[in-house]
Image (cartoon, rainbow, N blue to C red):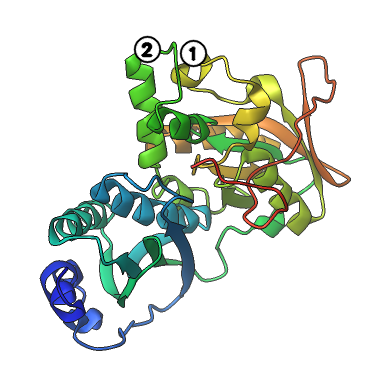
Amino acid sequence: MADEFRLIADLFAPLAAGFPGALGLKDDAALLAAEAGTETVVTVDAMVAGVHFLPDDLPELIARKLVRVNLSDLAAKGAVPFAVLLAAAFPQRIDDDWLRRFAAGLAEDLTRFAVALIGGDTVATPGPLTLSLTALGRVAAGRALLRSQAQLGDTIWVSGTIGDGFLGLAAARGALTGLDQADVATLADRYHLPRPRTTLGPALIGVAHAAMDVSDGLVQDLGHICRASAVAAVIEAERVPLSAAAQATNSPLASLLTGGDDYELLFTAPFRAAAALTRIGEAAGVPLTAIGRIVAGEGVTVVDAAGQALAIGQGGWRHFAKGDAWPV
């Protein structure tokens, strides 16, 4: 593996081109110019081999997933992304070809989403590959979408489809049997390459009340909104959107509602906003589905077509919950 300074100069400094404040990655900090009337939204997510991705996943896919899970957090705030910082702990066994492919994947999605790499750190480690990306976005001052603004009577909406990421992990591991190979490929792709809703998020400002992205399971993440907003939620199971590939697996609905890795936007909005949201979804090229409502009380309840509560079990993934083991 190349030394740290050559690695930065050869593979990562080109990704800072066009962003003067990055200083060509030749300094130990970046300079950001504030824009009048805006706030900077900052988020960070870490990914560890064997926890957040399979150890033998392609380096370019690992890099792109790292970018996308962070941009999804910005989208949930209604922020437009503009820069990222990368901290990487690379095992010594990683060679130059792996690093070039990782940098190529990073470059592909930074270009796709018009984002610059403006700094970070690289170190060697005897442990597993560990990556952390800090993403920055801009939103009009005082207009960011928060978890804490859900209101009684709001309709609960979700973008795209639910359960594909959870099933995609099984597909990537070769654990889905009896399924058409095209469906297996579709699900694996959703696991490897989440779709951050970077166009949809900013369009929800002024229409949605509360929002977040679905990373740890629909039920658990909706619970975060409920706790922050001091409300409860009811999900109508038959309304939850599932892809054709997910339906073909005949998986229990409970596992799809709690499995995580979807990176879709989950938000609440007043009932009267339905028509506007349909237009917003069409403009963003993302289907939006109303799946429930905000009510008084605590917690999240999932009901069937007759209004009877369904047993869901644990709401989603928790890193430090006793007895949990990530299935990678």
Q: Quadrant of the N terminus?
A: bottom left
x, y percentage for residue 93?
Answer: 25, 61
x, y percentage for residue 326?
Answer: 56, 45
What element does badge 2 sit on? loop
Spatial CA distance of label 1 from label 2 is 9 Å
Amino acid tagged 2: Asp
Residue located 32% across and 17% down the image: 182
Residue 268 sits in which quadrant? top right
Mark seen at residue 180: 2
The answer to whether the residues at label 1 and label 2 have Cβ atoms under 8 Å apart is: yes
| Left-right relation of 295 to 215 | right
Mark seen at residue 19: none
x, y percentage for residue 127?
Answer: 40, 65
| Left-right relation of 92 to 282 | left
Residue 87 seen:
no
Residue located 40% across and 26% down the image: 174
Q: Is residue 61 above or below residue 25?
A: above
Location of mark 1 (residue): 248
Q: Is residue 154 above or below residue 69?
A: above
Along the line of sight, the residue nearer the viewer: 42 or 27: 27
Residue 70 sits in which quadrant? bottom left
| Mark 1 surroundings: few (<14), some (14-19) or many (≥20) residues within 10 A | some
Along the line of sight, the residue nearer the viewer: 184 or 208: 184
| Left-right relation of 109 to 164 | left
State which tag comes first along the sequence, 1 or 2. 2
x, y percentage for residue 105?
Answer: 22, 52
Along the line of sight, the residue nearer the viewer: 128 or 286: 128
| Mark 2 surroundings: few (<14), some (14-19) or many (≥20) residues within 10 A | few
Residue located 50% across and 39% down the image: 262
Residue 323 seen:
yes
Residue 88 sits in which quadrant? bottom left
Residue located 49% across and 56% down the image: 73
